[in-house]
Image (cartoon, rainbow, N blue to C red):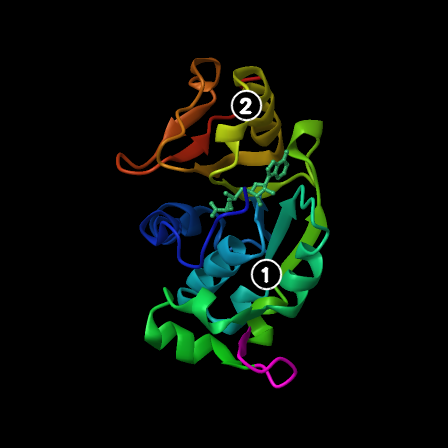
Amino acid sequence: MAFTYFFRDYQTLEMIREYVLPVIGSRRYINIWSAGCAMGQEPYTIAIMLRENMGPMIFRNVKIYCTDIDISNLFAKIIEEGSYAKQELDRIPPDIFSKYFSSDEQKPGNWKIAEEIRRRLVFEKHDLLTFQPVRQNMGLIVCKNVLLHFSDEERLKVYRMFYDTLDDGCFLITEQTQKLPAEMECCFETVAANAQIFKKIPGQQ
Ligand SMILES: C[S@@+](CC[C@H](N)C(=O)[O-])C[C@H]1O[C@@H](n2cnc3c(N)ncnc32)[C@H](O)[C@@H]1O
């Protein structure tokens, strides 16, 4: 169930620069929730993409709340260490790889993500089916390849929770194949024709 990889669907994540950053990029607290983050591949990809598009000072305003049900109880340590076997990193473009990774002296064969990037992520074990947010005032929620495992009723409750958790005018990204439930169509505006990026319409619940 935790199948994922670095730079998965990067063309969608890169749209954050065009659609999301103009709205939240100048905030003092740039709160992002990677819901169903697996072992950090998705939130680290987002963090690297943001750093590529932000100066070092503004990047310090970013906090990516990484959550997963994590039945293995291993994700917190993996994400905190940010150390991965080289074959897991093969899809990262070479220029990005050389900029943000260095060989891990504690774990031969592994490569470690730069501390500047690691410090922006915080992991919390969390079950989306509690329908409780990890915190409020999110500027962006990314929930990809998770919702497909839920029933229609569960999915709707999760979307409602995401809606309540986002600040007005802020953003939700899901995977390409995930359709917004009909009940939520009044709550979100689709901002990109070729990706599932939704903008919260205030006052709809
Ligand atoms: C296929 S991975 C997706 C990882 C990443 N979001 C991506 O798109 O590449 C699905 C993740 O969802 C997590 N997950 C499944 N059910 C969950 C739940 N009820 N609450 C939180 N996370 C859950 C799994 O543990 C797994 O890590």
Quarter assignment of residue 194: top left
Q: Is residue 80 above or below residue 144?
A: below
Q: Position of residue 119 (x, y in %)?
A: 63, 67
First in sequence: mark 2 or mark 1? 1
Q: Which residue is mark 2?
A: 155
165 w.r.t. 12: above or below: above
Task: Determine crowd level at label 1: few under 14, some 14-19, many 20+ residues with C-alpha closer than 10 A.
Answer: some
Q: Quadrant of the C terminus?
A: top right
Please give left or right for residue 134 compared with residue 180 in the image: right
Stretch of the chain drawn in magenta: 104-113
Residue 108 position, x and y percent, is: 58, 83
Kindly identify which numbered label has been placed on residue 61.
Answer: 1
Name above or below for residue 79 compared with residue 182: below
* Label 2 SS: helix
Type of amino acid under label 1:
Asn
Q: Tell me residue 49's x, y (percent).
A: 42, 61
Asked whether residue 24 appears in the rendered view, the answer is yes
